[in-house]
Image (spheres, helix red, strand yellow):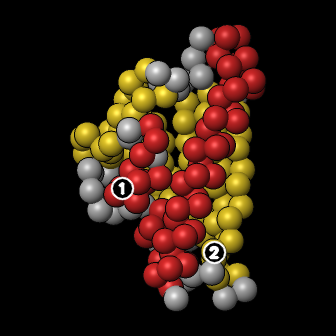
Amino acid sequence: MALIKLITYIDAPVALYFDLSRDIDLHRQSMAHTNERAINGVTSGLIGLYDRVTWQAKHFGVNMRMTVRISEMYSPDFFIDEMVKGPFKLMRHLHQFKSERNGTLMTDEFIFKSPLGILGKLADRYFLKDYMQALLVKRNQLIKQTAEARAN
């Protein structure tokens, strides 16, 4: 199992950052380089508690689909999305938001586990963790830019 933990400070209010982190359209923009699109469930706007979205994207030259569900949410403090169907054996993403220094501190805890036993463990350790972290950083950068532009 792999764990990615990111901390991002944004000069914008918690409620704005919380909503932008749930915005399907903004997520799609941040993943444009993978041709990611929402094809089922909530396909536009804000995703909410117990909602699902099925994403289709191209990673490593292969078209993949993954359905995630918002399993827990306490606005504007945190939400958790978890894979219910897709390429991982396990995928859970905790998004936490805290007011700090007139802005917001967001902590991402992204846990995933690939299938295929030892081959999956090797993939997680030697290239998937870095790949997934780069995707999360790219996503967070766009959310940060958008939130700060709207707050000012």
As drawn, 42 above or below 104: above
| Residue at the spot of label 1 | 24
- Comes first in the chain, label 1 or label 2: 2
Q: Which amino acid does label 2 sit on?
A: Ile
Tell me which corner region of the image, top left, top right, bottom left or bottom right, holds residue 139.
bottom right
Q: Residue at x 24, y 41 (%)?
A: 40
Residue 151 location (% of width, % of height): 50, 85
As drawn, 125 above or below 74: above
Which quarter of the rendering shows the N terminus?
Answer: top right
Is 135 situated left or right of 50 in this image? right
As drawn, 22 above or below 113: below
Residue 148 location (% of width, % of height): 55, 78
Tell me which corner region of the image, top left, top right, bottom left or bottom right, holds residue 129.
top right
As drawn, 116 above or below 53: above
Q: Residue 14 carries which label?
A: none
Q: Residue at x 26, y 50 (%)?
A: 43
Q: Which residue is drawn at 63% across and 52% down?
A: 137
Q: Which amino acid does label 1 sit on?
A: Ile
Residue 76 location (% of width, % of height): 50, 73
Q: What element carries label 2?
A: strand
Label 1 environment density (alpha carbons within 10 Å; few <14, some 14–19, many ≥20): many
Q: How many marks?
A: 2
Residue 58 visible here:
yes
Mark 1–mark 2 distance (CA, rounded to whole Å):
20 Å
Q: Residue at x 44, y 37 (%)?
A: 34
| Residue at the spot of label 2 | 10
**Residue located farthest toward the front when viewing the structure as drawn:** 33
Is 1 situated left or right of 144 in this image? right
Tell me which corner region of the image, top left, top right, bottom left or bottom right, holds residue 132.
top right
